[in-house]
Amino acid sequence: MGLFGEKQLKKDIKKNIELMKQILPIEKSFDVIARDIIIGAREACLIFIDGFVKDEIMIWILESLQSMTGNEFGKDVIKQLIKTKIGYIEVEAVKDIKKIESLILSGAVVLIVDGENEAILIDVRQYPVRTPEEPDLEKVTRGSRDGLVETLIFNTALIRRRLRDPNLIFDIRSIGTRSRTDVVIAYIDGLVDENLLSEIQDRITGIDIGALVMAEKTLEELIVKKRWYNPLPQVKFTERPDVVAAHLMEGHIAIIVDTSPSVMILPATLFHFTQHAEDYYQNITVGTYIRWIRFLGMLSAFILLPLWLLLVFNKQYLPDFLQFLGPKESTPIPLFLQFILLEFGLDLLRISSIHTPNALTTSLGIIGGLILSEFAVDVGLFVPETVLYMALAGIGTFATPSMEFSMAIRLFRLLLLILTGLFNVYGFIAAIIIIFIITFSTGSFKYGKKYTWPLIPFEWKPLSNILFRKPIPELKQE
């Protein structure tokens, strides 16, 4: 559909309607509606997308417009209608054809009047939306229960409700030549790193793609430089408005994509994926204890299996108090292959649970977690120790607050297991070096802190804030 060089509306309504038919499938798609009406003896046309319009408000506006007589019109008809007849807040005059097309496809109503080269935009959009609910992945025992939803304006309102700061900026862009998805860059002016903000804005502006098919995930891969061998997440996702507000107060940038409840937080370091809102909704001592237990779980998820395998392979060097390590009976499958099979089995169980109806998820967990592992031990394929340590590592993986980071831990653990199983201590050391190099070299933006900060480069104060859940007044003083 081309505009044939036309960029502005004409004064002839028939020509304007033809222009609209060239850029919109008015007679082809049932939900694109052109409604002919008469306003004060003048022909007019309402163009909108069915399903996006607030019917009650439009009926009220139409009653006001159609009650006009011809002698009520003055010289400037458009301004007169906006000021005296269309009693609605979000109304403006537009001339540009491209803008009109974009607004109609976004859900607004456009009114074209014969004899006028301007149209009236009436923003009576009403998107389908669900009630804000607590996100499944970020539940807390105490705290707010509202979560972000799939409608952009609702999400900005939930964030603005918590930060009534005039310096809170929501910079909106349209991304995708076909989807024209609304994307908002949120930041607090005066707290944000201006160089980093400019870099992110330039990357988003330079995106050339047809559609953000997978919403924020597609956008992430377009603005963050990814390497196929690096599973570490470089963007933090959250569905909690209080978490977004807290990060904005720390000078971060939030990117909100319409149609998605997940918000991207930039920039993100390694330790951003180790924290959870639960820490700050608990007592200071309890919050610190929970944080340490989480660190222990994440560490066990990463190192427990390959370290146990390494110690069993080199049992002759162990002191007497560690001689209990290792299986008491032999099996036809080598130990490291048992761990690999259990890893695949655990991931298969996780994937299956995603595709299983909620009513059957518990049954699937019982079958996969208890019956199959017990039968495997009874048959002699696995030793009890490998199942036990795999279960402990699995619990540590699920204790990780970030799903993306937990998957990175799994892949690194798999690398450690394979190299340790094949090359013993040399493989273990080589895998640790590879993981360290990947972690240290991770980073996507020219400006901002390194991915391993504040451990490398070392800064005690921010590192202590990660290790300990400090009182809010103490954090404020820092």
Image (spheres, grey):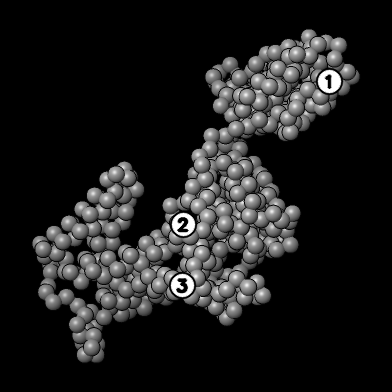
Name the secondary structure under disc 3: helix
Amino acid on which disc 3 is placed: Val
**Would you name the residue on which mark 1 appears?**
77
Q: Which is more N-terminal, label 3 or label 1? A: 1
Q: What residue lies at 75% left-to-right and 27% top-to-bottom?
A: 87
Quarter occupied by residue 66: top right
Name the side, left or right, on which 384 lies relative to 475: left
Q: Are marks 1 and 2 in contact (CB under 8 Å)?
A: no
**Would you name the residue on which mark 3 appears?**
286
Q: Is residue 78 visible?
A: no
Pinpoint residue 349: horizontal percent, then vertical percent: 28, 53
Pinpoint residue 203: horizontal percent, then vertical percent: 64, 52
Separation of marks 1 and 2 at Cα, in angstroms: 53 Å
Q: What residue lies at 27% left-to-right and 67% top-to-bottom?
A: 390
Quarter occupied by residue 15: top right
Q: Which is more N-terminal, label 2 or label 1? A: 1
Separation of marks 3 and 2 at Cα, in angstroms: 18 Å
Q: Are marks 3 and 2 in contact (CB under 8 Å)?
A: no
Name the secondary structure under disc 2: helix
Q: Is residue 100 above or below residue 458?
A: above
Q: Nearer the viewer, residue 357 or 284?
A: 284
Name the side, left or right, on which 251 lies relative to 179: right
Q: Is residue 431 above or below residue 21?
A: below
Q: Could you say which disc has been placed on residue 138 in the image? A: 2
Q: Nearer the viewer, residue 98 or 459?
A: 459
Q: Nearer the viewer, residue 389 or 416?
A: 389
Name the side, left or right, on which 96 lies relative to 333: right
Amino acid on which disc 1 is placed: Val
